[in-house]
Image (cartoon, helix red, strand yellow):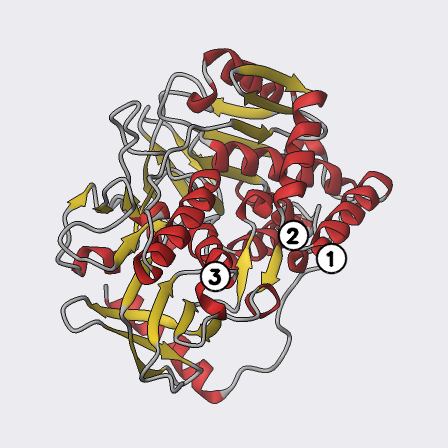
Amino acid sequence: MSARTRKQVLILGGGFGGLYTALGLEQTLARDSDVQVTLVNRENFTLFTPMLHEVAASDLDMTHIVNPVRKLLSHVVFFHGEVVHIDLASKHVTVVHGPERHSHELNYDYLVLALGSTTNFFGLPGLERRGMTMKSLSDAIHLRNQLIDMLEEADFECAAGERPNLLTIVVAGGGFAGVETVAAVNDFLRESIRFYPHLTAAMLRVVLAHPGDVILPELGPKLGAYAQKKLSERKVEIRVNTKVVCVDEDVVDLSDGSTIPTKTMIWTAGTSANPLIATLPCKLDRGRIVTNEYLEVQDWPGVWALGDCASITDHKTGRPHPPTAQHALRQGKTVAKNVTATIRGGTKTRFSFSTLGLLAAIGRRTGVANILGINFSGFVAWFLWRTIYLSKLPRLEKKVRVALDWTLDLLFSKDLVHLLDLRAPTVSQIEQEVDTSLARSER
């Protein structure tokens, strides 16, 4: 049967929600001769975000927390491209792909929106231009390179006057991403600085700014206080009830009136739904698509939404389900069942799920966790973090590689290789950099 006569199921986004929708359909509709299931993703891999900070801290090889989509899906068609336009009325999606960004139109009969979220900078002065983020693999690699850059530059004797700026790191946001990032960065710097003869650990300053009373509020005040205590013992400076209000070239301004000289500012304090969502004629809740209990989009039959771009009410609490990986994963499985039921005819499945547990790694062999209402801290929580997330990592090959990385990390020091592309830039790349510099100077 030709592609034109087959029913087209189109999944936009290859994060946890989109991937597990595709994996579910891989076992059902994707094997049918009269249905074609297509997954569109900007990268040709899926990223296991819970381990992202370990790449930045040189604990894990960057390729070990990503899985090629084509190795995960045998019957689902994969399209490597970026979604730039969605027309719900005419049922087609515009995707650009390749170095020249060729435009391609994809038609569909059934659509799954799993486009995830982007970083929200809240319009703070200088933040988007100067702040680093931790949402993608390139973000983690960029941060790792930045940390090594700062150590290398500070080690020059001629840079002695600049060392306070170079060796100060500011992380904004005391949620899971911020705490795990600041803990990993702190460990990396303090374990690596011994290889730089002109530097000492006393020169390092690592700051965590959090707008609330206690970090990790999702885990409750007891575990949050424990995490603060442990991080403080490891020389992390924690500023609670404090927000970043401005980021200048070499200075971060805080809401308490203080300023911190730094060349490295990491922003983990906000996300918003993919900007494409705002262009759709759908009911939105704080920028996210409102769905019913079957994850269907209101007024648009044959369209489902899930993950970070969807607002899905938990009927037990009356509040939206949190945008976590464990929720998105299970939402993907539910959407796969409901797409199958819609096409084949059958009973649809309501989405119902309660958080099983929350875990955070807060430094060397230390963690905090709440699992089924029971609190864990210290080594036990750290061990649970590693065990549970290792079990969730797709494919045995990647599990083995990560386990080996962790074992080697116990035996050897941090890798300080600077992961830069050393190829000479093309003329077009040079021209683009010049144009970018001119545009910035005109602002």
- Vertical placement of residue 70 versus 154, above or below: below
Residue 409 horizontal side relative to residue 269, left or right: right
Residue nearest the observer in this picture, 197 or 391: 391
Query: In the figure, residue 313 lies in which quadrant?
Result: top left
Between the residue at mark 1 and the residue at mark 2, the CA separation in whole angstroms equals: 29 Å
Above or below: residue 333 compared with residue 352: below
Residue 326 image offset from top left, x and y in percent = 48, 39
- The answer to whether residue 52 is above or below residue 437 is above
Separation of disc 2 and disc 3 at Cα? 48 Å
Q: Which residue is mark 2?
A: 148
The residue labelled by disc 1 is 397
Sequence-first disc among 2 and 3: 3
Which residue is drawn at the image coordinates 42% and 21% (left, top)? 217
Instruction: Name the residue type under label 3.
Output: Thr
Residue 132 visible in the snapshot: no
The quarter of the picture where the N terminus appears is bottom left
Q: Are marks 2 and 3 in contact (CB under 8 Å)?
A: no
> Callout 3: helix, strand or loop?
loop
Q: For the residue labelled by badge 2, is the local secondary structure a helix, a strand or a loop?
A: helix
Q: Nearer the viewer, mark 1 or mark 2?
A: 1
Which badge, 1 or 3, is on the more N-terminal residue? 3
Give the residue type at disc 1: Glu
